[in-house]
Amino acid sequence: MKTIKFFTFAALLLLSSFTSFSQKSTAEKPTIIFVHGIWADGSSWSNQITALQAKGYPVISVQNPITSLADDVAATQRAIDQAKGNVILVGHSWGGFVITQAGNDPKVTGLVYVAALVPDSGESLASLSAKGPAVTIGNYLQPSGNFLYLTLEGVKTVFAQDLKEKEQNLIFATQTPGAQNVFAEKSGVPAWKTKPSWYVLAKSDKSIHPDLQRFMSKRANAKTTEIEASHVVMLSHPEEVLKVIEAAANAKK
């Protein structure tokens, strides 16, 4: 009887230790905060979200209103405030502008740019884009009030040309349009000057020219991974993008 009680106690002690270790390990993982771009939404990171959650990472995917840079930074700041520890910010496209500003928060320990814009102080989306070869995405925009939508032809031609039609249709249906004023808004002091950065470069991107991506990633001294993919590389090559995010999360601080 004493032997049974001893083994029961030992089993409970072992289980308690394992649970404590598991909780501690999870708590030590940084929160991964995803920031989408114009003509996308928070679900565009679904593959990475589920994979990271399965590995015990806390994850938040921001839903940007894309009404102004300040509004989007505020939405991301609310997500940062929810995090209990360190934060890795991951931004796609226009999301790069957002994490460049929000990344100045002391909780943020790393920035991951995914086919993203990486502005310096005083640069706007328009002025930064002018530093690289021209792209034709502007030919596929449909105005509605003060907002610009991307047409279905644009999704299929210059935004997500390497996805299946079903996925392209979903992007078109769930897109968040951008307020026209965001294209002229100027960036503030960039976090990439003081925080380590990673860059996923989409080599077949027709929305942000690959040469511009190389210029920005080099200027930010980012650890760069080039992938043969369209602008929505996180959807067409989810596992490769995930590896870069995990590398940032596990980097020595």
Image (cartoon, rainbow, N blue to C red):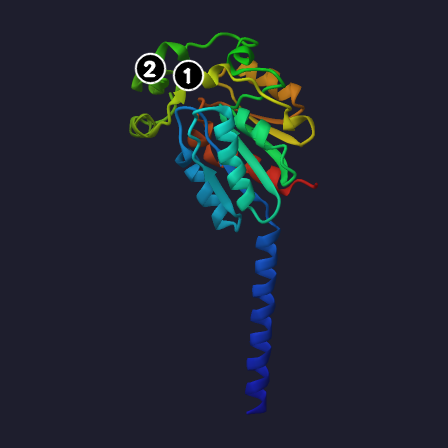
Which tag, 1 or 2, sits closer to the chain's start?
A: 2
Q: Residue furthest bottom?
A: 1
Residue 48 visible at all:
no
Please tell me how crowded label 1 is: few (under 14), some (14-19), or many (20+) other residues with Cα within 10 Å. Answer: some
114 over 46 or under it: above or below:
above
Q: What residue type is disc 2 on?
A: Pro
Q: Quadrant of residue 223?
A: top right
The location of residue 34, given as percent across then percent down, is 50, 36
Name which residue lies at 48% across and 29% down: 71
Q: Quadrant of residue 6?
A: bottom right
Label 2: state its secondary structure.
strand
Image marks 1 and 2: residues in contact by CB distance under 8 Å: yes
79 over 73 or under it: above or below:
below
Q: Is residue 5 left or right of residue 171?
A: right
Q: Is residue 116 left or right of residue 251?
A: left
Q: Dividing the image into 4 quarters, which one contains the C terminus? A: top right
Q: Which residue is mark 1?
A: 180
Name which residue lies at 44% across and 31% down: 64
